[in-house]
Amino acid sequence: MTRCGYVALLGAANVGKSSLANALVGAKVAIVSAKAQTTRARVTGIAIEGESQIVLLDLPGIFAPRRRLDHAMVDAAWRGVEDADRVLLVVDAVAGLDDAALAAIAGLSQRAGRPADAVINKIDAVKRPALLGLAQKIDAAGRFERVFMVSAQSGDGIADLRGWLASHMPEGPWLFPEDQLMELSERLFAAELTREQIFRQLHQELPYSVAVTTDRWTENADGSARVDQTVHVERDGQKAIVIGAAGARLKAIGTAARTELTTALGRPIHLFLHVKVAPDWGERPDFYRDWGLEFAAAGPRPR
């Protein structure tokens, strides 16, 4: 008997939802950064456990939105919850039940019929007594069937969590081929890997003003591919930062992204980056459409 279902990863920004998705799948399907609000699109990773297929929705974080993009991201998170068969609330062991975590619990409580579990992530950064106290507080909310303690980075507790999810997926046929790890186009995945390197290499607020698009994907006869991307920034000064002295920063970003993409796809990738000033990219519906976000989203779903 096969099982298959959708599991939404919900939580505040930077609690490790993307790292958890990667750990559950056993491969990189979502970009990871130490900076908050890295995830923009709803990334779907696919994990297999026994006869169960677990389709993971790695959602944008819950935070107080300001810009149009912020509102669209938070809206996407709550839409993902509505689409899921089960919800995992991910809580940072260090941050605990901060305002964002409490907001996520409050919003989730409005969906009493949605099965949910809680996952305390980054347990290797907190001592055991503090973890037990946090687990008791989460359990007291009365919203979760189980509270798991894991470290997405080390893999501690991941097998137990995956086994629990597998046994609680609805009965039914698998939705994806056994060897498929994510439901994300190669174009968007490639753009996300480049954006990940921008987050990692530019340690100021600039990454939040950057978007990356894959403009052309050309298959070569030898099995390799040429990928042309544009890095969109809002101002000329930001363009200079991305390019760096004599193009050094852009080259470093491209080299790192190409290496990641070549490894992920298992074939040679030739990546070419261009930087363009687009002051209004945050107000262009086509960017939102590519990311699966609602351009007209007015705010968080729970009202």
Image (cartoon, rainbow, N blue to C red):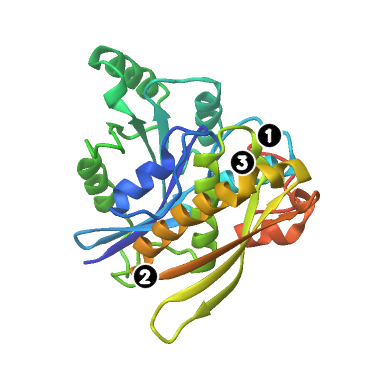
How many numbered marks, from 0 up?
3
Q: Nearer the viewer, residue 161 or 182?
A: 182
Q: Which residue is mark 1?
A: 65
Q: Is residue 79 left or right of residue 115?
A: right
Query: In the image, which is nearer the foreground, mark 1 or mark 3?
Result: 3
Tell me if mark 3 has few (under 14), some (14-19) or many (20+) residues whose alpha carbon lies within 10 angstroms of its own.
many
Q: CA distance from mark 2 to mark 3?
A: 33 Å
Q: Is residue 53 left or right of residue 138?
A: left
Q: Earlier in the sequence, mark 1 or mark 2?
A: 1
Query: In the image, which is nearer the foreground, mark 1 or mark 2?
Result: 1
Please state which amino acid type lies under the numbered disc 3: Pro
Q: Position of residue 237 (x, y in %)?
A: 75, 41
Please state which amino acid type lies under the numbered disc 1: Pro
Query: In the image, which is nearer the foreground, mark 2 or mark 3?
Result: 3
Q: Position of residue 258 (x, y in %)?
A: 45, 60
Q: Which residue is mark 2?
A: 176
Could you tell me which secondary element the residue under label 3 belongs to? helix
Up-down relation of residue 238 to residue 222 (above or below): above
Q: Which residue is mark 3?
A: 207
Q: Which quarter of the image is occupied by the C terminus? A: top right
Q: Give residue 31's mark.
A: none
Q: Residue at x 35, y 24 (%)?
A: 139
Q: Earlier in the sequence, mark 1 or mark 3?
A: 1
Q: CA distance from mark 1 to mark 2?
A: 34 Å
